[in-house]
Image (tube, grey):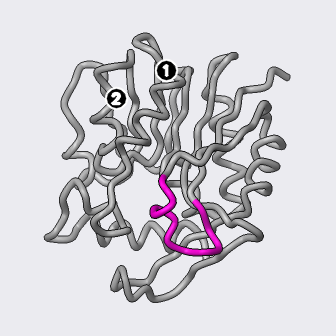
C-alpha cells in the first residue's frame, strides 16, 4: 500500500475515454475549486511564483494563473495537463513529484487533493523537498481529507470509483507534526469547505498552511 497503487488508479483515469477536466473530481457532481482558488489567492499576489504539485487537469490553476506572477505545474500525466490554459506564465512539467527537479525557488507551494495518496514515509520526503524549493519566507498549503480522531487507511476495490483505490487520510495533528519535523512552523489548519463536502464521519477536509522556518 503506497503511492504506486494510487498512480495506477490515476493512470487509468488519465487514459480513460471519458477523460475530461472534471475526471479528477472523484466525489462526483461536486466541485469546490472556487473555494480552493480563493484560499490560495489569500496567500499570493500578482508577483507570486507558485509551484503546484499534483495539478491534475488544472481546475484550480486555471482560476488563479491570471492573478499571480508565475505557476509551475507538476503533473505526471499529459492526458490531464492538456486541459490547463495556455499562458506565458504557466509552465507544465510532466513528471511525478519524486522525479521533479528545478533550481528555481518559489514563494508558495500548493498540494491540493494530493498528499492523501502517499504513506507517511513518502510524505516526509515530499515535505522536505518542498522546504528546499521555497524562498526564505515561503509558504506551503496542503488541502485534502484528514482523519478526525486517527489515521484512516483506504485500500481495495471502491464501488464508487469502480476500481482499486488507495488513500491514507492521516490524523490532522500527525500531519502538522510531520510538517514541523520537515522544517515548517506557524502551522495552522482551516475548515474552508461547507459541511456537506465532508461525506464521511471519520475524515474531514482541511487546508493546512505553514511557513518555511529558517535553520
Q: Residue furthest front?
A: 195
Are dots 2 and 1 in contact, CB under 8 Å?
yes
Q: Tell me the residue that label 1 is attached to.
A: 44
Q: Which residue is mark 2?
A: 64
Residue 22 drawn above or below residue 49: below
- Does residue 16 appear to the left or right of 117 in the view shown? left
Single out the residue that lies furthest toward the left: 17
Task: Sort mark 1 into few (<14), some (14-19) or many (20+) by Cα contacts within 10 Å.
Answer: some
Q: Is residue 212 magenta?
A: no
Q: CA distance from mark 2 to mark 1?
A: 10 Å
Q: Residue at x 45, y 26 (%)?
A: 41
| Residue 1: image location, x then y, percent | 61, 77
Magenta segment includes 203: yes
Q: Which mark is residue 97?
A: none
Task: Tell me where the magenta segment starts and ends, as one range.
Answer: 194-204
Q: Nearer the viewer, residue 14 or 85?
A: 85
At which x and y percent is residue 214? 81, 20
Position of 90 with respect to 139 (left or right) is left
> Could you tell me residue 72's position as x and y percent?
40, 30
Picture layout, residue 157 above or below residue 126: below
Amino acid at each position: 500500500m503506497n503511492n504506486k497503487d494510487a498512480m495506477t488508479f490515476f493512470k487509468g483515469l488519465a487514459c480513460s475515454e471519458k477523460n475530461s477536466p472534471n475526471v479528477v473530481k472523484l466525489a462526483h457532481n461536486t466541485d469546490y475549486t472556487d473555494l480552493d482558488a480563493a484560499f490560495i489567492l489569500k496567500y499570493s499576489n500578482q508577483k507570486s511564483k507558485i509551484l503546484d504539485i499534483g495539478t491534475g487537469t488544472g481546475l484550480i490553476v486555471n482560476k488563479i494563473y491570471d492573478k499571480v506572477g508565475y505557476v509551475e505545474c507538476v503533473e505526471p500525466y499529459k492526458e490531464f495537463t492538456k486541459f490547463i490554459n495556455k499562458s506565458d506564465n504557466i509552465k507544465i512539467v510532466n513528471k511525478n513529484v519524486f522525479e521533479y527537479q528545478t533550481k528555481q525557488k518559489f514563494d508558495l507551494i500548493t498540494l491540493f487533493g494530493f498528499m492523501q495518496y502517499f504513506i507517511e514515509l513518502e510524505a516526509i520526503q515530499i515535505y522536505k523537498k518542498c522546504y528546499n524549493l521555497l524562498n526564505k519566507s515561503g509558504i506551503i498549503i496542503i488541502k485534502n481529507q484528514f482523519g478526525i480522531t486517527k489515521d484512516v487507511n483506504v485500500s481495495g476495490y471502491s464501488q464508487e470509483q469502480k476500481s482499486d483505490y488507495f488513500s491514507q487520510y492521516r490524523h490532522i495533528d500527525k500531519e502538522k507534526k510531520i510538517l514541523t519535523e520537515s522544517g515548517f512552523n506557524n502551522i495552522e489548519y482551516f475548515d474552508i469547505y461547507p459541511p456537506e463536502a465532508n461525506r464521511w464521519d471519520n475524515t474531514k477536509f482541511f487546508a493546512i498552511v505553514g511557513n518555511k522556518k529558517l535553520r
